[in-house]
Amino acid sequence: MKDKVVVVTGGARGIGKSTVRMLIKQGAKAVAIARNENTLKDLKRDVPEVGTYACDVSDEEQVSNTFDDIYREYGRIDVLLNNAGVGVWKTVEEMSVEDWDVQLNTNLKGVFLTSRAVFSKMKEQGSGHIINVASDLGYTSIARGGAYCASKWGLLGLTGTLLKEGAPHGIIVSTVSPGLVATDFGGVEAEKKLEKGLKPETVAAHIIRTIETGDETGSVDVIVKPQPREN
């Protein structure tokens, strides 16, 4: 892990922030991307060693410019962690086109844009690891989760394609798919998920292990579920 350059989208809060902390402790050069500059400032105060960039991963121009800046500053990217995500919980009847678009644009289009931004450079390096934070809802579906489930099912499909295209060039593509996580997400506060949800640090630990294990395996797919609890 030491001196690896690891870019984390959605890196200023929740799973991303916990992962950044662990990366820094293990000697990696962590770079956090987030839309909100204030959350990035908070992260920088908490973890001064992290590099920070404000970027909306669903915006093609912003992604291109941001990754150009990262390559100029760091010279390479060893790992891209696609963690940025949006959830809106409404029935299909209730859901607006805007609700649909914001989830598909961030959760799926954003991964396409960031992965495309690193792919040619990783091919030149002859190595690289893209890790997509999917969800257990990429394997099943729930009511009021139409767009979110669609984005995560689509993300698993995109991951498979990236793996096939990247493998001949030494590029590893993996997924970490958590169940309910105790973070502020989808309009539900973390405190309301503490009893049944995973801690973000738990998911981050699996991400770190995926980075480490991937060097030897070529691809890792992990589903992380909370401990079952009695109602």
Image: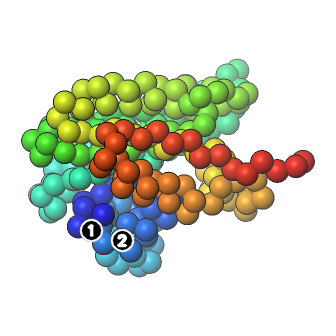
Where does residue 72 sit, x and y in percent of width and height? 11, 58
Name the kind of residue labelled 1 in the image: Lys
**Secondary structure category for the residue under label 2:** loop
Q: Residue at x 70, y 53 (%)?
A: 197
Using the image, determine if residue 39 lies above or below residue 67: below
Query: In the displayed image of the protein, which residue is found farthest to the front?
Result: 216
Q: Say which residue label 2 marks.
A: 26
* Near-viewer residue (63 or 222): 222
Tell me: 192 left or right of 198: right
Where does residue 43 sit, x and y in percent of width and height? 43, 71
What kind of colouring is applied to the model shown?
rainbow
**Does residue 183 show up?**
yes
Q: Quadrant of residue 26?
A: bottom left
Name the kind of residue labelled 2 in the image: Gln
* Near-viewer residue (128 or 86): 128
Q: Residue at x 70, y 21 (%)?
A: 93
Using the image, determine if residue 136 lies above or below residue 185: above
Q: CA distance from mark 1 to mark 2?
A: 6 Å
Q: Quadrant of residue 203?
A: bottom right
| Location of the N terminus (image quadrant) | bottom left
Q: Residue at x 9, y 41 (%)?
A: 124
Tell me: 85 left or right of 73: right
**Secondary structure category for the residue under label 1:** loop
Where does residue 10 sit, x and y in percent of width and height? 43, 53
* Near-viewer residue (118 or 27): 27
Ranked by sequence position, the earlier of labels 1 and 2 is: 1
Give the numbered dot on residue 221.
none
Tell me: 17 left or right of 212: right
Give the numbered dot on residue 2.
1
Using the image, determine if residue 96 lies above or below residue 203: above
Q: Quadrant of residue 143?
A: top right
Where does residue 91 sit, x and y in percent of width and height? 71, 26
